[in-house]
Structure formats: C-alpha cells, structure tokens
Amino acid sequence: MDSVDDSKIIEVLTSYRTIACVGFSKDPSKWAHFVPKFLLSVGYNVIPVNPSAESILGRKSYASLHEVPDKIDIVQIFRPSEEVPEIVNESIKRQDVRVIWMQKGIANDGAAQKAEMKGITVIQDRCMYEEYSKLMLKR
C-alpha cells in the first residue's frame, strides 16, 4: 500500500480527467471492465489500452501507451505487478502523465519509486472505483 492520504486522492480525482486504462478488459464481468466503465459514467475520458481489442465500449483501443495520441493525466493499471515496470517506463517517456494508479492487488515499489523520482504521483493497490465512491460520492 502507498502512503497517499485521502486529500491527495481527492486532488487527483478532481484535478485530472483523462485516464489511459492499461488492461481495460472487453469482458463485462471483470473489474478491469467495470471500473473504467464506471469512470466513463461519471465524466472521465477513459482511453482503453489493450492490444487484443480494436475498441471497448465504442472507444478506440490502443496497443500501448505510446500509441495514444491524446494527452494522458492518469495511467490506470490493470495488469500483473511484474508488468508494472514496463508500463511505468512508457508513462515516464510520455512526459504528460501526472499520476500512475495501480488497481487493488497491483503494486511494484521499485517502479513506483522510479516514477515518483520523475515527479509522478503513484497510488498502489487501491481501487479507483472504491476510492471515488468513498471520497467523492459523499461530497
């Protein structure tokens, strides 16, 4: 778990609107589909990053972060922890990513430290849906 407090999470959720979801699933029964679909429903611009899909929920899917033409604020990760370092490296190369959010059950302290040294906020092992529901719906 990271050391990010609720006020920082609220700042992230209110300040940034464009999320590249690495591992956005085509399968509606998976959290990696439900969470980004929820985020779309509350007004975020969610960009699927999934090399096995042409589109998800009618949105063009990209094979990797470097293919996404839009500015990215948040990289949301729904991939195994061992894949995180490569995703973090891609995020750093983009130079527009402000936050890396590893979903519940996903963490990589080494990659997190590397991103933080580049000025990127890192949230690990937390569900974006749960945090939004807990902190934003009561406001």
Image (cartoon, rainbow, N blue to C red):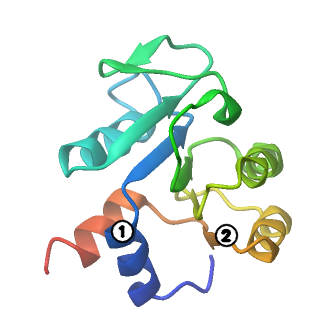
Q: Please provide percent x and percent y for residue 22.
A: 58, 38
Apparent side of residue 56 relative to residue 118 in the rendered image (left or right): left
Q: Amino acid at mark 1?
A: Leu
Q: Please provide percent x and percent y for residue 85.
A: 82, 51
Apparent side of residue 19 relative to residue 110 in the rendered image (left or right): left
In percent of the image, x 22 and y 50: which residue is there?
A: 43
- The image's mark for residue 84 is none
Q: Which residue is mark 2?
A: 120
Q: Is residue 120 above or below residue 8?
A: above
Apparent side of residue 50 relative to residue 57 in the rendered image (left or right): right
In which quarter of the view is residue 13 placed? bottom left
Q: Which residue is mark 1?
A: 13
Query: Badge 1, how many Cα within 10 Å: few under 14, some, many 20+?
Result: some
Kind of element beneath mark 2: loop
Query: Badge 2, how many Cα within 10 Å: few under 14, some, many 20+?
Result: many
In percent of the image, x 52 and y 56: which residue is there?
A: 74
Question: Foreground residue, 68 or 85?
Answer: 68
Q: Please provide percent x and percent y for residue 108.
A: 77, 62
Kind of element beneath mark 1: helix
Question: Foreground residue, 73 or 84?
Answer: 73
Q: Amino acid at mark 2?
A: Ile
Q: Is residue 80 above or below residue 105?
A: above
The first of marks 1 and 2 along the sequence is 1
In percent of the image, x 51 and y 13: which residue is there?
A: 53
Between the C-alphas of marks 1 and 2, the distance is 15 Å
Apparent side of residue 50 relative to residue 138 in the rendered image (left or right): right
In which quarter of the view is residue 112 placed? bottom right
